[in-house]
């Protein structure tokens, strides 16, 4: 699943904000009581309101009486349920630490001279549970660094683009699913965040255990691994999720102009020098942006959008302005705002789309037919294709066909290495047109 640029930008920058793809709905007072971290913040604010500034301990922690009260309202820690006398300070409880941090990062409370007190704005916010929740979630998503509460290296994993995780649970949460399922989808969209095997665990901890679980949006069941396998979690969406979280229904659809004169191009996309030919046939509006067409090609061919790309027409290069020295040296035209019709003008016209300048995957795009626009159709649509896309980073066309020769011989010295690299068998003839169109329609 590779998202259109405007969708990714929306998810990263506007989740829970005006115009965003993911928004909060107002709940009943009974439902607000089902949000553990909100109840913890309400509890803390109650002490600050009733007692005035609360003096912190010498180490800057909340007094134990407040910690105990907050801990009892949060996500249950089996250890302190069994041994309540072991809870001796704020830092013993992860849920209390996060709830206090959210209270401060949201601007509801402020630390002054080793005391914690409500702010003027906080005094207003605590009168309305919805305003409190909005302030807490804004802090959760954009201000508090969830990564500071664990030992994983990259602070961005999980929290960056966290709206995507909510969208995935909204889409797939009708049945229990392994956290790996969600991690795979997340890293499909943000592949540069995946740093190895630990990334999936990091994602699960931050997205589910320390975010959605604390908000009452999911239940998390730990599946302990064997000696040779990792522990994962089974994620189950709660009834509260659908009451609180609203996701735009047309989020993943490509946007394009419906102005007079817009036509539909039937494009045949062929991977140059492939034999047998690896190709796809798609229907796209002539008004589609070149930046969006890039995503269409990636999804229908089966690439992962790991590398740079460009369009080539009459010797001229068109690509996204990366702003680096390489882009400037290539004398490339910035294609921002350019449409497909700016390069292709009618039947039989063609351009080259090149992906990954190292492996050099060149695709020939030819306009086979120009059709009238059907406003009842959600474009793009894939209408045909053959053969599996080569795997990323396999060495271009020569490397790909060398790999296929090795895979024909289980006794070849490189066979096991390729199987491990591919994560299993590889069928060069496989192509699932239904899967492509599911991605295009937003069902992925």
Image: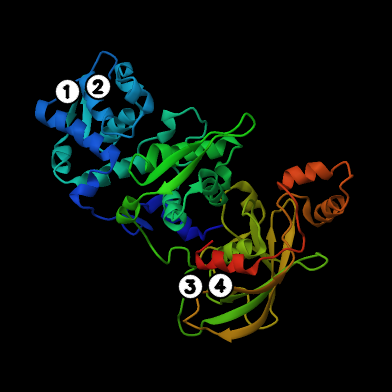
* Position in image of residue 177 (x %, y %): 50, 49
2 or 4: tag closer to the N-terminus: 2
Q: Are discs 1 and 2 less than 8 Å apart at CB?
A: yes
Q: CA distance from mark 1 to mark 4?
A: 59 Å
Task: Answer few, some or many: residues within 10 Å of disc 1's Cα (few below 14, many 20 plus, some between 14 and 19).
Answer: many
Q: Nearer the viewer, mark 1 or mark 3?
A: 1
Q: Is residue 232 above or below residue 7?
A: above
Which of marks 2 and 1 precedes in the sequence?
Answer: 1
Q: Nearer the viewer, residue 210 or 155?
A: 210
Which residue is tagged 3? Answer: 256
- Whether residues under marks 1 and 4 lie with C-beta atoms below 8 angstroms apart, the answer is no
Badge 2: how crowded within 10 Å, few (<14), some, or many (20+)?
many
Query: Is there any visible trace of residue 345 in the rendered image?
Result: yes
Tell whether 44 sits left or right of 10: left
Q: CA distance from mark 2 to mark 4?
A: 56 Å
User: Which of the 4 quarters of the picture holds residue 214?
Assistant: top left
Numbered disc 2: secondary structure: loop
Q: Which residue is mark 1?
A: 54
Residue nearer the viewer, 99 or 110 = 99
Depth check: 99 or 3 in front? Answer: 99
């Amino acid at each position: 699943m590779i998202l259109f640029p405007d969708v990714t930008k929306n998810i990263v920058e506007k989740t829970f904000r005006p115009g965003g793809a993911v928004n909060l709905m107002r709940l009943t007072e009974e439902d607000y009581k089902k949000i553990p971290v909100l109840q913890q913040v309400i509890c803390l604010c109650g002490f600050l309101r009733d007692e005035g500034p609360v003096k912190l301990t010498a180490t800057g922690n909340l007094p134990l009486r407040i910690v105990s009260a907050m801990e009892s309202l949060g996500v249950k820690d089996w250890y302190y349920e069994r041994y309540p006398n072991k809870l001796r300070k704020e830092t013993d409880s992860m849920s209390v630490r996060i709830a206090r941090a959210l209270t401060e990062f949201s601007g509801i409370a402020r630390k002054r001279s080793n005391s914690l007190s409500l702010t003027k704005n906080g005094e207003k916010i605590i009168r309305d549970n919805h305003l409190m929740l909005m302030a807490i979630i804004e802090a959760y998503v954009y201000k508090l660094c969830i990564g500071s509460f664990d030992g994983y290296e990259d602070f961005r994993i999980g929290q960056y683009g966290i709206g995507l995780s909510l969208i995935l649970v909204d889409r797939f949460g009708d049945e229990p699913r392994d956290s790996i399922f969600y991690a795979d989808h997340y890293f499909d969209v943000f592949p540069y965040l995946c740093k190895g095997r630990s990334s999936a665990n990091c994602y699960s901890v931050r997205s589910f255990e320390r975010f959605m679980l604390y908000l009452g949006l999911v239940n998390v069941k730990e599946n302990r691994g064997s000696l040779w396998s990792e522990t994962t979690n089974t994620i189950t969406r709660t009834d509260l999720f659908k009451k609180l979280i609203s996701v735009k229904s047309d989020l993943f659809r490509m946007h394009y102009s419906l102005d007079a004169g817009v036509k539909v191009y039937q494009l045949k996309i062929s991977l140059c020098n492939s034999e047998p030919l690896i190709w796809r046939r798609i229907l796209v509006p002539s008004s589609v942006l070149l930046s969006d067409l890039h995503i269409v090609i990636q999804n229908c061919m089966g690439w992962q959008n790991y590398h740079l790309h460009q369009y080539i027409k009459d010797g001229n290069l068109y690509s996204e302005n990366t702003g680096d020295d390489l882009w400037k040296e290539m004398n490339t035209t910035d294609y921002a705002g350019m449409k497909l019709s700016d390069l292709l003008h009618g039947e039989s016209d063609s351009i080259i789309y090149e992906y990954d300048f190292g492996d050099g995957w060149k695709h020939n795009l030819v306009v086979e037919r120009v059709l009238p626009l059907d406003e009842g159709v959600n474009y793009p649509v894939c209408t045909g294709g053959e053969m599996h896309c080569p795997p990323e980073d396999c060495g271009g066309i020569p490397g790909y066909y060398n790999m296929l020769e090795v895979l024909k011989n289980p006794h070849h010295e490189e066979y096991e290495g390729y199987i491990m690299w591919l994560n299993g068998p590889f069928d060069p003839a496989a192509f699932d047109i239904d899967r492509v169109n599911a991605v295009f329609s937003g069902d992925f």
